[in-house]
């Protein structure tokens, strides 16, 4: 009886793992077909970042903002 429960749990785990692997594969294919375009830095984003940095570290100067991928 207990052995059947372990087998059922193992099969359920494998099925979920296979489904998640298939969905990850579909996401990878979708990303390759439709790549994300590079976003430009909007002035409102720069102002929000600068305001936050100035409020945390008063007197600092921001010299360069880059987006890391």
Image (cartoon, rainbow, N blue to C red):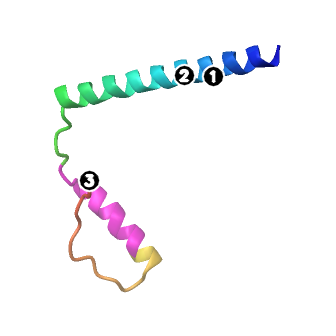
Pick the front one: 55 or 66: 66
Instruction: For the residues labelled 3 and 2, say whether their Cβ atoms are less than 8 Å apart.
Output: no
Q: Nearer the viewer, mark 3 or mark 2?
A: 2
Q: Nearer the viewer, mark 1 or mark 3?
A: 1
Instruction: For the residues labelled 1 and 2, say whether their Cβ atoms are less than 8 Å apart.
Output: yes
Q: Could you say where residue 31 lies in the image, as x and y percent from the top left?
A: 24, 31
The N terminus is located in which quarter?
top right
Q: Is residue 23 above or below residue 38?
A: above
> Mark 2 = which residue?
14
Q: Could you say where residue 14 lies in the image, as x and y percent from the top left?
A: 54, 22
> Mark 3 = which residue?
69
Q: Which of the numbered marks, if any, corresponds to residue 29? A: none
Callout 2: 10 Å neighbours few (<14), some, many (20+)?
Answer: few
Magenta-tinted stretch: 40-53
In the rendered view, does 35 fall on the left or right side of 58?
A: left
Q: Could you say where residue 17 lies in the image, as x and y percent from the top left?
A: 50, 25
> Mark 1 = which residue?
10
> What's the distance in space between the residues labelled 1 and 2, CA to CA?
6 Å
């Amino acid at each position: 009886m207990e052995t059947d429960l372990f087998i059922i749990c193992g099969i359920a785990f494998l099925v979920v793992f296979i489904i998640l692997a298939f969905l990850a594969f579909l996401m990878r294919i979708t990303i390759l077909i439709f790549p994300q375009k590079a976003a430009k830095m909007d002035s409102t984003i720069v102002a929000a970042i600068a305001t936050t940095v100035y409020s945390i570290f008063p007197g600092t100067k921001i010299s360069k903002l880059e987006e890391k991928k």
